[in-house]
Image (cartoon, helix red, strand yellow):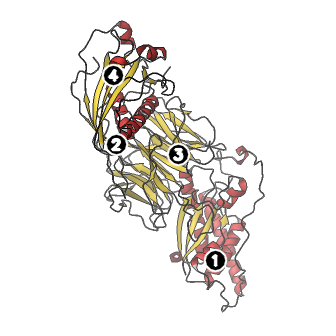
Amino acid sequence: MKDAFWRLTIIAAVLAIAAACGGKKPPVTKPGPDPFPSTSVPADPNPVVSTPPPPTALPVPPDANPNARPYDALSTDDINKKSILKPVFFLYDSDELDEAARKTLESNAQILKEYRAWVLTVEGHCDERGTPEYNLSLGDRRAQAAKNYLLSLGITADRLKTVSYGKEFPFNPGHDEGAWQQNRRAQFMVTAK
Amino acid sequence: MINKTFVVAAIAIGSAVALTRAAVPNPEITARSIQDPPRQQQPRELVLALDNPSYQPRIGIPDFVAGGDAELQAAAKTLADVLAADLDFEKEFLVVDRKASASIPAAATPETIPWDSWRQIGADFVIFATMRRSGAQFTIDLKVLSTRSEPVGQQKFGSEYSNCAMNNPRYCAHFISDDMHAKLRQLVGVARTKIAFASDRDATRQAGRPDMGAIGKEIYISDYDGANQRPATANRSLNINPTWLPDARGLAYTSYVSRFPDIYITLFDGRPPTRPAAGTDVIQNTLPAVSPDGQRIAFASGRSGRYDVWVVNRDGSNPRNLTPNTPNSDEGAPTWSPSGSQIAFTSDRTGSPQIWVVSADGLGPPKRLTSDVHADAPTWSTQNYIAYTLGGGPGHDVAVIDLSKMETRIITDGIGSNKQPTVAPNARHIAFVTTRWGKEQIAIIDFPTGKSLRRVTDAGNNTYPDWSPVPGGTSNATNRTARIPQ
C-alpha cells in the first residue's frame, strides 16, 4: 500500500517535472546550432569507455529497519568522500534530468528521508568545453534542476542549498569524453548532520 | 628639438600593487629632462627622427655605466635588459638585440662610443646612461644619442631619473620606458601595468570532497612581462575573475570562501575585503566588472531565478537588475564601455550565448553584437573594439568586434584553445588564456596583428586574466592608435 502510494507520487512528480521542463526549455535537440556540436570534437586517440563512478552507497531497501542506520557513524566528510548521496550526470550543455538521474535522485531522497538531520548543498558542475563564464550559469541550472526534483520528492527546501562551480572543480581532471561525462554533474555535499 | 619643456615632472604614484601582507610601495621616481641646445638637423635625420611616428627608429642599448659597485652593476644589467624588452614590446623602436651588440666595446663617456660599430649593426641611436648610487636608491642619467647626426653623437633625448630603488631596478626600467614612449612617441606605454589572474599553482586540494579535480585557486598578480608573480589572496578556496579598480589600487573578484560565490573588493591595505553585492547562500553573485569611475559594480547573479546582469553601487546601495525581462535565459559576464555609459554582456536568450550591449542604466532595448556559434566573456577596450571568447569548435579562439564597422574577426591562431581575452590599457595588446603549451597559461599577442606571442605564466593552470590600468593614469600622453610595424 505504502509502496504503491510512493510509486504514484513519483510518477506524478516525474510527469509534472517533465511537463514543466518541456514548456520552459526544449530538451537536448533544441533549435539552432548546438554551441559545441559533439561531432566537432576530435576522436579521442585513447578512448576511455567510461561510466559514472560505481555506486559506493550502501543499498537502503525501502523497508529498511529504522534501527539500522549505517551512516550515523560517518562524519560529513566521510559521507561526502564516499558519495553516499550519489551524483547525477547530464548530457553535454544540458540541465535535463534523464531517467537515470531521476532514479539516482529518488534513491538519494530515500536516504535523506532516513537521515532527516542532513542538510546539503547541491553543487552544479560542468565539463571543460563550454566557456568558463557560461559554465557558471549552466552549473547553476543543473544544481537547480536536481534541487527541484528533490523538492518534488518531498525533501524540504530548508535542507537544500545550491551552488555552481562551473567547470572549476572537475570530478576527473582528464580531457577526454570519459572525464567529461563524469564532470557534467550535480553533486551532493552534506554540510550538517 | 624633441621636447621644448625644460623640466617635466612625471611622478609615478607609488606601486600599482602591494600585497595585503607586505605593502612595499615603489619609490616615487622623478624624471627631469635634460636637453642639449637645438642644432641644425640634416634632412636624413628628420626622416630617421626618434619621434617620427611613421618610422621605427633603431636603438642600440649597451650596458650602462655603473662604476665599481657590484650591486649597482647588477642593477644596471637588469635595467638595460628590462628597458630593451619594454621598448621592444611596443615596437615603436626597433631594439638592437643586446646579445648581438654585446661585442661592441663599452664606452665610459659619450665621446668614446664606437659609432662605426653601432652604425654597422644598424643602430640609428644609442642609449648612453650613467648610474650613481645613494644608499638604497640610485639615479640614472639617460641620453639617446644619434649615430647619424653631423657631428655624430647629437643628443635627441635626455632625462635624469632619481629615486630608483636598488632592490627594484625592473620598476625603474618600466618607468623609463613609459616616459620615453610618452615623450617621444605620444604613446601610453604599459610597462608599469600588471595582470591579475586566477591560478591553481598552490595545488590546494579541497578537503572532504570526492572529486580529485577540486583544486583551489588564488588570485595572483604578475607584472605585464611575467615578472614578480605573487598571490593577492590566500584563503585556500576558489577565487576567480579578478578585475582591477580603475586606479589600479585594488581588485574586485569572485570568491567561494564562504562556500558560495560572492564579490569581494580588496585594496591591498590589510583590511578585510568589502562585499558590495552582499551575497548570502541564496543571493549569489559572480563575474564582477568595475565601472570606469570606480563607483559601480556590474555582476551576474541568479538571485531572481536565472542569471541576470545586476549593477550595485560600490558602497552596496541600490542593487538593480539590468536584464529583468528575460526570465528563461542567462545573462552574465558584463564589461563596461570606456565612458561607462554602456555594458556589454553575454545572453543565451536567442538559444546560444551571444554578446549583447545595453545602456548602463538599463533603459532601452539591448542590442545583439554577435552571431556566432557561442560567444562569451566580452571585454571592452579603450579603442572602440570588444574582444571576446568565440566557442563552437573543439577549442575556443579570441575574436574581436570592431564597433565602428560592426565587423568581427578571429585574432588568435587556433593553436590549442584560446579564451578569456583582456586588453592592455593602450589597446595594442591582448592577454588571454591558451592551452597551446598543455595546461591553461596566460599569453599576450599584439593587436591588430595577432602576432608577437609572449608567454606570461608557466606554473599550474592560470585563467581569468585582467590587465591593469596604467598606475597614476594616462594624462601625460595621448593615446595613439596601433601602428603596424613594417
- Eyeballing the image, is B293 above or below B266? above
How far separated are the C-alphas under marks 4 and 1? 84 Å
Please say if B270 is above or below B177: below
User: Can the viewer see residue B272 in this picture?
Assistant: yes
How far is disc 2 from disc 1 in space, using C-alphas?
65 Å
The residue that label 2 is drawn on is B166
Residue located beneath label 4 in the image: B109
| Chain of the residue displaying label 3 | B
Could you say whether the residue bearing mark 4 is in a helix, strand or loop?
Answer: loop
* Mark nearer the viewer, 4 or 1: 4
Residue at screen point 33% across, 55% down: B314
- Mark 3 to mark 4 CA distance (whole Å): 40 Å
- Looking at the rendered structure, the kind of residue marked 2 is Met
Q: Chain of mark 1?
A: A
User: Looking at the image, do the residues carrying marks 3 and 2 touch, with CB atoms under 8 Å apart?
Assistant: no
Q: Tag 2 or tag 4, which sits nearer the N-term?
A: 4
**Mark 3 → mark 2, Cα distance in angstroms:** 26 Å
Q: Which residue is mark 1?
A: A109
Give the residue pinned by disc 3: B457
Residue positioned 29% across, 19% down in the render:
B2
Which residue is at the far top? B43
Note whether B386 is above or below A99 in the view shown: above
Q: Is there one chain holding both mark 4 and mark 1?
A: no
Residue B365 visible in the shown view? no
C-beta proximity under 8 Å, tags 3 and 4: no
Q: Pick whichever, A90 or B97, lies toward us.
A: B97
